[in-house]
Every structure is written in C-alpha cells, then in structure tokens.
Image (cartoon, coloured by chain):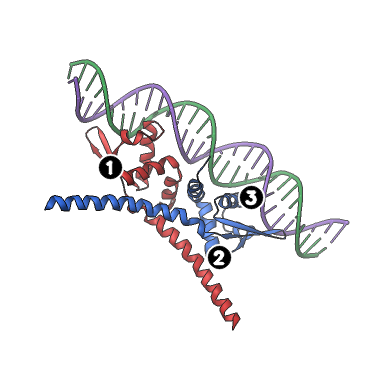
Chain colours: A red, B blue, C green, D purple
Amino acid sequence: MQLATDTLFKALADPTRRALFERLCREGECTVVVLTSGAGVSQPVVSKHLGILRDAGLVEGRVNGRQTHYRARTAALSPLADWTREMNDFWHKRFDALEDLLGRMDQ
Amino acid sequence: MQLATDTLFKALADPTRRALFERLCREGECTVVVLTSGAGVSQPVVSKHLGILRDAGLVEGRVNGRQTHYRARTAALSPLADWTREMNDFWHKRFDALEDLLGRMDQ
DNA sequence: AAAATACATATCCATTTGGCTATGGATTAT
DNA sequence: ATAATCCATAGCCAAATGGATATGTATTTT
C-alpha cells in the first residue's frame, strides 16, 4: 500500500515527469506526439510517464479520435503545498517556544 | 549531473526519509539512536538516509562526542514551495487569458 | 481498401535504490 | 584497561525504476 502523498512525491521525483508536467502547466493541453517532441525520450516512455502522472492525479487525458489530449491538474499539488507549510509551521512553533523561553529567562 | 531541485525532490520521495525529516521538524534536534527508534529500519539505513537528506540541504548534523545531533533545515524547502507556486501561476495565467478571451468574445 | 498516424501495452535490460549484516573508529562508562 | 555505546562506511542483494524496441488497436488520410 502507498499513501496518496507518497504517490505524489514519487511522481514528481523524476525529472522527465516533472518536465512533462511543467510543460502542460505552461502550454495547456498537449497531445502525446507534441509532448514527445522535446521530451528527450521515446513515445512509449512518455506514455508510461503520463500514466504515472495520471495515477498521481497530476494530469488527466481526454481521448479524441486517435489522439489523447493531456492537461495538468494543478489542484493535485495541494498536498505538497500543505505538507511544506506544515513542516514550516512545526519548525516555527518550536522556534517561537524557544524565543518565549529565552524571553522569560531574560526577566 | 543533477540539479538542486531534482536532488530535493528525490530526497523527499522516499517515505522513510520524509518521516525522518518530519520528525526533526516536530521534535527538533535528535541523535541517530533516537531517530532509529521508531524508524522501522536499522541504524545504518537511518545514517544513509540522513546522509542523503544532508546532501539535499534538508538536515544538518552537529557532532558532539560520539553522537551526532541532526536538525531540520526548513529553509531548504523553499525551492519546492517556489516550484509549486510557479506551476499554479502558469496555470492561472492561462486560465485568466482564457477568461479574458471569452469575455471579449462575449461583447 | 490500403497506408499512415497516434497511442498504449508488452518485453526486455541496465542501473539505481533501499534494505540488510558486518565492521571499524571514536568516545564514554565501568 | 576494558567494555560498551554511537555512528558511519563497506559490501551485498532483491526489488524497483527508467529507458529501449516491438507490436497491436484504433483512427485518419489517401
């Protein structure tokens, strides 16, 4: 089993996949041929990566005839943003507690 | 060669490593023995993961006698937060442009 | 109807990864 | 001085990963 957050982090860990996702964010909907051009890897590899991004909820595909149009789902990034914020909060909470303690010692 | 952002994403992709980092954020400085307890893996594995986290700038170690105290460096999360924000911005920019276009077509 | 295109799936392979145990060096405790 | 503790490094191994090519199935084009 694997948590959703883990799937998300793992999906974004690969540079080729991140590049695909970035491109979809910048350029909007793209077909697989378009994405393959400039991806630096073969079409089957692009398809595989898109599958992994889809499983992570990061992209969705719309089939139209013989081509599939993929688009980014930026909403899927929320857990990542939340996690980052949470880690910062933990850290600040501890820092504030320390400051408070030092402040009281200073009295 | 590998970009800094890539190192960061890769470091956070592993659940064991993320758990170690989370714990350091929550609890502040910990020694390796402490981190090993509850990590679910052996001490050498914990050391190895801490090394990877250190290379990514996510933790730093302070040697004191025979023990090493590790602490989280939440500042290292910035590139991740920036990247997330950037992806959202790309998406919104495109969305705004579309709204604008639709608005003008509506005239 | 035949050829070409778009994409996904199936296999295969080399490399990377994440875990383990064993060990060694350094420090602290007895 | 000896023993125990802490941590890192060194090998080792199975599994996962990222790539390639080959192929199949739809759909368009000609």
> What residue is at 63 percent from the left and 52 percent from the top?
B43
**Residue A104, image x and y in percent?**
57, 81
Cα–Cα span, label 2 and label 1? 44 Å
Q: Which residue is mark 1?
A: A29
Give, as a three-letter code, the residue at label 3. Pro
Image vertical order of residue B28 relative to residue B52, above or below: below
**How far apart are labels 3 and 2 at the CA level?**
21 Å
Taking A1 as reference, is B39 left or right? right
Spatial CA span between label 1 and label 3: 46 Å
Q: Residue A70: image x %, image y %?
A: 29, 41
Residue furthest to the bottom in view is A107
Picture disc at residue B27: 2
- Residue to which mark 3 is pinned: B44
Q: Secondary structure at mark 2?
A: helix
x then y, percent, for residue B41? 58, 52
Q: Nearer the viewer, residue C4 or C12?
A: C4
Foreground residue, D21 or B43? D21
